[in-house]
Every structure is written in C-alpha cells, then in structure tokens.
Amino acid sequence: MLVLVANLGSTSFKFKLLDMEKNGDVVARGGYERIGQKDSPYATHGDVIDVILKECGRKPDAIGFKAVHGGPISGAVRVDDNVIATMEQFADVAPAHNPPYIAAMKAFHEKLPNVPQVAAFETAFHQTIPLSRQIYAIPHEWTEQLGIRRYGFHGASHRYIATRVKELVPEARKVISCHLGGSCSVCAIENGKSVANSFGMTAQSGVPHCNRVGDFDTFALMKLTKQGLSLEEIFKKLSKEGGMLGMSGVSPDMRDIEMLAGSGSSGSARAKLAIDAFVESVRGFIGQYLVVLGGCDLLAFTGGIGENATTIREAICHNLDWAGIVLDPSKNHVRGREEKISSVESDAEIWIVPTNEELIVARQTVQVLSAN
C-alpha cells in the first residue's frame, strides 16, 4: 500500500509517500512554504496538491493526515463528514492547524474521490495520561460539557520516540522525550505509554514555541484589554508574535537567535534572555516529569532544535547529575543523526533520536483501513 502522509501548517505543506509493503520506504518527499503569502505561486493548500501528486509520480492508495485537534475524536479514524465537522468546531483553539487540514481533506476528496483518507490525531498517544493530569481547576461543567482539558499534542513524534527507544534500549522504562523545534513539547513516557505532556488544551501552550506563547497566565488578558486591545488582537499577537520571536525581538528561529546572542558582551541581551527562558521552561518540565516517573532511564532529544542545537542540549542537561543525567560534551557535537551522547558516569542514557512522524501516521492509516 502506498500512503501519502500530509503534514500541514498554516502556510506550509510537507509530504512523504511511503511504500508500506517495503517497511515504509520513502518513495517521494517534499515540502512547500509561504502558501497564501505575497508573491507565493500557491494561493491555497489545494493549489499545492496538484504539484505534489505530480511529484509522487504514482497514485496513492491512501492519504494519512497528521491531524492536530479533533476534540472528543481521538486516535486514527477514517475521514468523513462528522470528522471534518468536529475539526471545524475546534478550529478556534487550533487556528494554525485545523483550517488548512480541513481544506486539504476537502481538496484531496475532490481530486481523488475514491482514495480513502485517515486522520491520525496527535492527541491519541496521550489518552493514557491520568485524568488528574488532564483536568484544569475550573468549573467541572466546562470540563464535561465543553471539553476544556489538557489534551497533549505531538503524539506521532512522541509515539515514534517511545517505539524507537524500545528498540535502542529495551530496558528503558522511564523516558522523557523532548520534541524541540518550531513547535515544542516535553513528554513523560512510562513503559511505552504517555503519562504526561507539556501541551494543554491547545498547541499554543507549554514550552515557548517559535512564535507561539507557550504557558501564559489567563488573567493577564484583563490587563491587556484595559490597554484598548481586543481579545482578537491579543490572541493574534500571542499566536503570531509570541514565543521566541516575542522574547528575542529578532526572529522565531533558534538559529538566528543563537547567532545574535553571540558571546561575551557583544551579543544581544534579549536574544540571550530568550534562550535562557526557553531552556528554563524545558528544564522545568523535565524536573516535573522526574517526579511523575520517579526518575529517568532515558532522556531523548528530537525535532530541529533537539537534534541540532548542541548548546541548547548542553544548557538543558546542565547540573542534572543529581538526577543521574550527565551529558558527555565530547559526544554532544552530533547534529541530525541518531546517537547516544550521555557520559559513562550517567545513570540515565541521553540520546538524539530523529523523529519520523510520517511513518507513525502511515502505520496508523494502514491499521484503520485494514480494520475496516
């Protein structure tokens, strides 16, 4: 079975065509950015689909979506009108993700009406999180009737880490997975199952992201509205101008921020502060999950930052020897490849594990269609 996996953002469309008869070998891959922006040849995600299908060279047997928020719908499910309608209901809390996915699902159906589609929701891996770590301290009817709770995201990535770690270090039962990139999250994994995740109800929360705020005190909204800002303006700034961009004032990209931070007194103070705040947030979740898990057998880094930012990894692991986590500086130079980077003195193993979300989605797609 050839599965085309679609990974969409508000202005991006990445894809992989995988041959599941050959253990998920990649037949074709690619990506497009700045969709809908000025001077872009692609006004919509639908415009990109024609180009992608030509690049694939072969008609897919199925299409799998790394879908984000389905509210009460979780797991991997066949896309139908009910799935799309539910995603539309939760588009207000996933504004950067649900609308482009919905548009792509409809466009693919128009172009390939007989090719089945499966939505593999990122919340699925986190269904094993105990309820005590899901609920907010809010009126209970909001939780029950409106579905306001912590869902957790990056499920495909953390599921892959759990699967791969079991192959690399079978005895590792307590795993902390750090997916650090344009979007970031930390996940506590026990015996291959998610037991805590830094994301909350939306993908705007948790660790600071490239331009999304991360955790934020909701009562600060009252202060902002008194400055004459509407809620729409506030949320737009928090989701477009927050995160690393907001703190550094220069860029949402960690590479640019690290370059500006420089060394010594010549670097940008705001860039340095943004990096420090990012590192503190990640370390805070690691500390929390050390308590949740009762220790750590393996600390995994994945995502663009996690796989490549050597100084960020070093800062995150600094002074964690009390928890049995000791990085080997001589091994930490590795970028973008799977490698063990912990010291021989470390009780916990530290690994770089490049993620493969598309493979997870393709496997889930095959499982759903086989079951049906």
Image (cartoon, rainbow, N blue to C red):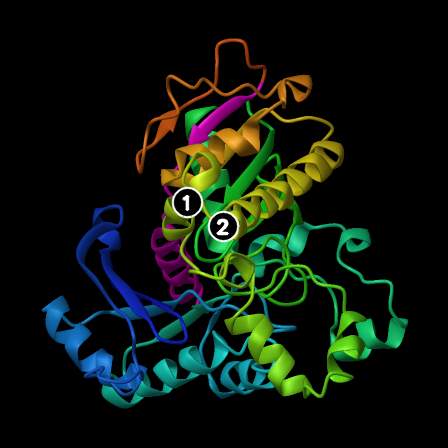
Furthest residue in direction front, as rendered: 265
Residue ID at (75%, 72%): 148
Which badge, 2 or 1, is on the more N-terminal residue? 1
Q: Secondary structure at mark 1?
A: helix
Left or right? Give the position of 35 relative to 328: left
Which quadrant would the C terminus be assigned to in this image? bottom left
Tell me if residue 170 can be seen.
no
Answer few, some or many: residues within 10 Å of disc 1's Cα (few below 14, many 20 plus, some between 14 and 19): some
Amino acid tagged 1: Glu
Residue drawn at x 66%, y 42% is 285
The residue located at (41%, 58%) in the rendering is: 367
Q: Is residue 274 above or below residue 287?
A: below
On whether residue 288 falls in the magenta region, the answer is: no
Range shown magenta = 348-372
Instruction: Measuring from the top left, give residue 144's x and y in whole percent.
Output: 81, 74
Camera-side residue of 187 and 18? 187
Is 368 included in the stretch rendered in magenta? yes
Which residue is under mark 1? Answer: 258
C-alpha distance separating marks 2 and 1 = 7 Å
Examine the rendered structure and indicate whether residue 117 appears above or below residue 166: below
Q: Is residue 116 left or right of residue 246?
A: left
Image quarter (top left, top right, bottom left or bottom right) of the N terminus:
bottom left
Q: Which mark identifies residue 271? A: 2
Callout 2–callout 1 Cβ contact below 8 Å: yes
Depicted 322 relative to depicted 7: above or below? above
Could you tell whether 210 is left or right of 41 in the image? right
Q: Identify which residue, 11 or 268, lies in the foreground.
A: 268
Q: Name which residue lies at 39% across and 85% down.
A: 103
Instruction: Estimate the x, y position of residue 284 in percent, counting from the top left.
Output: 68, 41
